[in-house]
Image (cartoon, grey):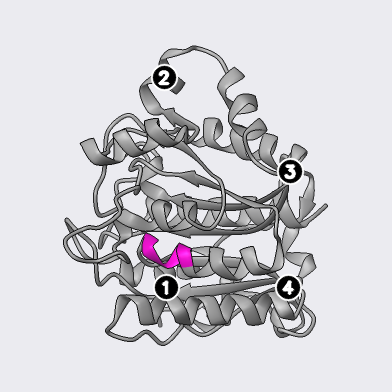
Amino acid sequence: MAVKNPHFYFPFNFGALPHELADYGKSKVVVLPVPYDATTSYKPGTRDGAHAIINASRFLEFYDEEAKKNFSEIGICTLDEMEIVDDAKGTIDRVYEAAKTILGDNKNFVMLGGEHSLTSGAVRAFKEKFSDLSVLHIDAHADMADLNGESKWDHGCVARRCYEMCPVVLAGIRSLGDEQARFIEENGIPTYYAHEIFCSGGDAWMDEAISKLSDTVYLTIDLDALDPSIMPSVGTPVPGGFRWFTLLKLLRKLAASKKVVGFDVMEFMPIPGMHAPDFTAAKLVYKLIGEFYCK
């Protein structure tokens, strides 16, 4: 008789954690999954991203060999997937309300998406609590359009909406339109383009980028910031992105000098039969929980 995979019996939460480590009241970290992709512009499917990341996380081993500790011991609660509405602004408002509640309960916030437009809802809640907030936006795309079509709430406008609330630093950029490029230049928005990062041959840009941020930071990562060779599971892959250890080095530097009060990992679009990207995304989320919240 075939033996069933024991993971089928594990809790469906981030890390398949037992109740004592996943209880909302006792957990230090709260994960908000949002299955939304109504404004994606190339290939849809990011609505399934949070579910795929959580599923892959159930197979992680939690001892981190670099930090020499088990991050899961701080408690990681995974909420049910957020119920979305047809209206983009309405869904973003729901993210805002959820983030506001989680912050009000003094929990550390992690959002899994889902398309990038959702980030502006979270940033609005964080800006209300942290007046000196800034945003580090790691992405292949600048997302600085004022409008995409007739919408201000498209995923390609998210960095612009965040910039209207607080300072934004862009990193890893390698795709943007004329209007966005002009807006970035005219407003002096610190932007670290991929060709400059990877052709410079050094890490000085990391320290410079981090120095442009305030002491309190919200981090948002569009997974297409990673190179498609290690992260093909995104809606609009662009060649020339971050590799694993380069991105981790940047984020460790960020954690060492700034207070990261919340983060999200967005735009994951699982590809059936291709499991490595799912695991990469889950491992990244777990690493960042450790870097930012296990001090």
Q: Which residue is mark 4?
A: 107
The circle on residue 51 is: 1
Dot 4 or dot 2: first in sequence order is 4
Residue segment shown in magenta: 116-120
- The x, y position of residue 121, in whole percent, is 49, 70
Sequence-wise first label, 1 or 2: 1
Residue 161 position, x and y percent, is 42, 58
Q: Which residue is mark 3?
A: 258
Say whether residue 206 is magenta. Answer: no
Task: Determine whether, in the image, residue 252 is placed left or right of residue 57.
Answer: right
Rendered position, 184 above or below 88: above
Looking at this view, is 23 or 167 the one in front? 167
Whichever of labels 1 and 3 marks the residue nearer the N terminus, that label is 1
- Expressed as whole percent of the image width and height from the top left, the position of residue 239 reads 27, 33
User: CA separation, marks 4 and 1?
Assistant: 21 Å
Type of amino acid at the residue the image marks with label 2:
Glu
- Sort mark 4 into few (<14), some (14-19) or many (20+) by Cα contacts within 10 Å: many
The residue tagged 2 is 196
- Mark 3, mark 4: which one is toward the viewer? 3
Q: Quadrant of the N terminus?
A: bottom left
Between 239 and 73, the residue placed more toward the observer is 239
Nearer the N terminus, badge 3 or badge 4?
A: 4
At a point 51% along the width and 85% down the height, the residue shown is: 80
Which secondary structure type mostly characterizes the magenta part of the structure?
Answer: helix
In the image, residue 161 sits, relative to residue 175, either above or below, namely below
The amino acid type, in three-letter code, at marker 4 is: Lys
Q: Marks 3/4: CA distance?
A: 18 Å
Cβ–Cβ under 8 Å for marks 1 and 2: no
- Residue at position x 38%, y 36% in the image: 184
**Residue 294, quarter of picture:** bottom right
